[in-house]
Amino acid sequence: MVNTPDKGITDFQSSDYVIVTVPTPINERREPDLSALISASHYIQQNLQKGQTFIFESSTYPGTLEEVIIPIISQAGQKVGEDFYIGYSPERIDPANSQYSVQSIPKVISGQTEKCKQKVQDLYSTIFDVVVPVSSPKVAEMCKLFENIQRLVNISLVNELNTLCESLGIDFYEAIEAASTKPFGFTPYWPGPGIGGHCIPVDPLYFQWRIKKNGAISQLIEAAHVINEEMPEKIVRKVKGMVQSPGLVLIVGIAYKKDVNDLRESPALPIIQLLIKEGYEIKYHDSYISSAEIGDKVYQSVALDEQTVKEAGCILILTDHSNIDWKLFKGMNRVIDTRGIVKKVSV
């Protein structure tokens, strides 16, 4: 509604609550791009009705609500906590995860004032099973970054360990499954072709940018980011070791995670671009993404059958969708399985 004033202005002005969930990507310099958030804030300022409550859910760095959003909305003299109410509540959702519904995921909330926080709680307590109030919007903003920084660091760690185990002749999957039998102090993470989606690769960069403003930096986050950025080149080197250019590489799955149709920040994209640059012929199968524009070409998903598999010099598994018959690849020596899914399939 905030992004479409030509359609939403009537609804906006008659609403008691307005929830803002606009994109917060990074720009070409790998820095926060708050343009949509700033645009939404200006729209709110121009159309604000006294007593309205605004809840921002877009992932961003700590201090955004207080330092960027509120000054815009209140620039005409409106007072937060009196003329309008405002809070921050990070979006929590795991696409394609049927175990947790949106309603069942605890909802972290905050407000710029106690009255603001109460307004947010009044609404969200009618929607979510558990509401978790925190002391300030900065804490809530950091909460979301913390969640995704942890994912970035741990996934980058297992990707690096997987590579190192290969160099030692150790089956990484057997080792981590053995470690997972420890009932305390260990949580398994699984390797892959790199981290994708609109949160995990992006949110840590928001945090790094903010703390650099304070003259600090997280060396661990920086190292994890570098490991993730290097994954496409590592995978392409494996392909080159299996089949020479201009051989055919069949890519199985290009979505950033299983059972979704989302290509945002998918590691498949830079991998395919590198393979094209090396002169390989590319075909892909993904039942969730029927076509994809990569570089200057539009690719169509091909059928995954014995003939398609037979033609490929290398089969590169990037996404482990549940609807694929992985037995098709059992025992093949032309497969690079970045998800370790084939070895889990019984004959």
Image (cartoon, grey):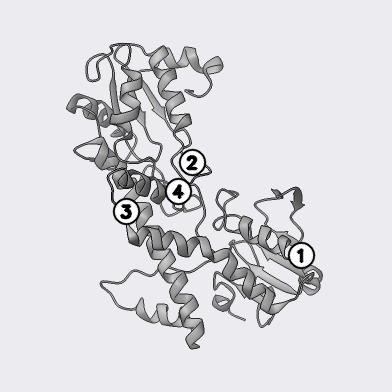
Ranked by sequence position, the earlier of labels 2 and 4 is: 2
Residue 330's spot in the image, x, y percent? 65, 79
Residue 116 shown left or right of residue 310 in the figure: left
Q: Nearer the viewer, residue 222 or 142?
A: 222
Residue type at tag 2: Pro
- Labelled pair 2, 4 in contact (Cβ < 8 Å): yes
Q: Which mark is residue 324?
A: none
Of circles 4 and 3, which is in front? Answer: 3
State the quadrant of the C terminus.
bottom right
Q: Residues within 10 Å of mark 3 (few under 14, many from 20)?
A: some
Ranked by sequence position, the earlier of labels 4 and 3 is: 4
Separation (CA) of disc 2 from disc 4: 7 Å
Residue 109's spot in the image, x, y percent? 27, 37
Residue 332's spot in the image, x, y percent? 69, 81
Q: Can you say whether 17 is above or below 306 in the image?
A: above
Separation (CA) of disc 4 from disc 3: 16 Å
The residue that label 4 is drawn on is 202
Q: Nearer the viewer, residue 66 or 106?
A: 66
Of circles 2 and 3, which is in front? Answer: 3
Q: Can you say whether 13 is above or below 193 in the image?
A: above
Q: Quadrant of residue 90?
A: top left
Of circles 1 and 3, which is in front? Answer: 3
Q: Which mark is residue 217?
A: 3
Ranked by sequence position, the earlier of labels 4 and 1 is: 4
The residue that label 2 is drawn on is 25
Ranked by sequence position, the earlier of labels 1 and 3 is: 3
Residue type at tag 4: Val
Q: Residue at x 55, y 69 (%)?
A: 339
